[in-house]
Image (spheres, grey):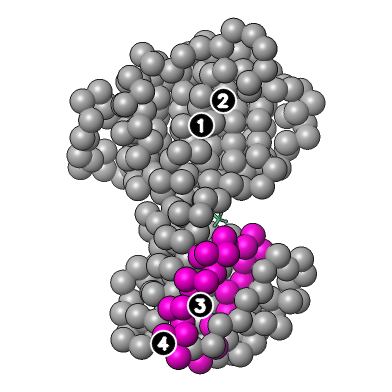
Amino acid sequence: MKILVATEKPFAKKAVDGIREIFDEAGYEVVLLEKYSDKQQLLDAVADAEGLIVRSDKVTAEVLDAAKKLKIVVRAGAGYDNVDLEAATAHGVVVMNTPGQNANAVAELTIAMMIFMARNGFTPGTGMEVRGKRLGIVAYGAIGRIVADVADGLGMYVHVYSRPNPNKIRLYAKHLRRDDTLEQMFTESNFVSLHMPSTPETKGMIGYDLIKLMPQGGVLINTARKELIDEQGLIRAFEERPDLKYVTDIAPVAIEEMKEKFGNRVFATSKKMGAETAEANMNAGLAAARQIVGYLRDGNNEFQVNN
Ligand code: 3PG
């Protein structure tokens, strides 16, 4: 049984060693394809694999066509918008994610980015403190909950918005408040942080109409997906509001235009680094390996995301 670990952005060595150990014990062969630059390398490597672990690597219909023996793909991470679910289902391939496994790493980066922007990107000048400020968290899943807890500890007022049924959310910390609309959240929050997946419903969800509502000096934080932002809408709002800032872990398509127009009011990491901790790599990588063994050996399809 051959398992391919295809990670253009490799896992930490310790995580790779742990993944190998799990598959060795199960008697499966592991093939590593790391830092590959050409899609053809993935198409060749996947041809005889029965299991596949990826990170943000794109698992398209073409990849699935090439993977004649494939039974399962596990996206070691939360968002599985990089996997063509329909094509996987059509090929009889099970798709899973590893929910929550890298949530703490992303939440910590979110808090770091918030303070980084509050202190003017660590450049000279007067910044602001976050204590007593309002943080709006859009989507209260595994990451949103940790961000809420930490922000509560920092003395912030935390607003939470979650679809589809905000009434069902249980709020734990004492300063948490549920907002019924995004308009309400954007109007009152000094910082707004996005934690929803990229789906047809969330694409372009955050644009001019919401961003322009933010209070003076508002900061939008995106450690989720670039597709959530209507970039031209953001640009328009930022042109009208020279006080607003945007910090993101996923470079916008229009990053050059944004840098030129807004300078250090916009900051984007050069490569997505939310899940780039040894701990997150271990958690997500090992969970992915265990889920593959669990499925191939025992038929356990917990965490399956396609039908
Ligand atoms: C996720 O959806 O889990 C994160 O975006 C992490 O993605 P990565 O594994 O490519 O770093």
Instruction: Tell me the kind of residue under disc 1.
Output: Ala
Q: Earlier in the sequence, mark 4 or mark 2?
A: 4
Q: Is residue 26 magenta?
A: yes
Residue 173 lies, in percent from the top left, at 23, 30
Question: Within 10 angstroms of label 3, few (less than 14), some, or many (20 or more) residues?
Answer: many
Residue indicated by mark 2? 116
Residue at position x 67%, y 82% in the image:
45
Residue at position x 62%, y 76% in the image:
32
Apparent side of residue 152 relative to residue 239 in the rendered image (left or right): left
Numbered badge on residue 112 = 1
Residue at position x 40%, y 24% in the image:
135
Q: Earlier in the sequence, mark 4 or mark 1?
A: 4
Instruction: Tell me the kind of residue under disc 2.
Output: Phe
Q: Is residue 90 above or below residue 126?
A: below
Residue indicated by mark 4? 26
Q: Nearer the viewer, mark 4 or mark 2?
A: 4
Span shown in magenta = 1-27
Instruction: Tell me the kind of residue under disc 3.
Output: Arg
Q: Quadrant of residue 167?
A: top left
| C-alpha distance separating marks 3 and 4 | 10 Å
At numbered mark 1, what does the secondary structure look like: helix, strand or loop?
helix
Q: Is residue 86 above or below residue 193?
A: below
Q: Is residue 33 magenta?
A: no
| C-alpha distance separating marks 4 and 2 | 45 Å
Give the camera-side residue of 187 and 278: 278
Instruction: Tell me the kind of residue under disc 4.
Output: Ala
| C-alpha distance separating marks 1 and 2 | 6 Å
Residue 50 lies, in percent from the top left, at 52, 87
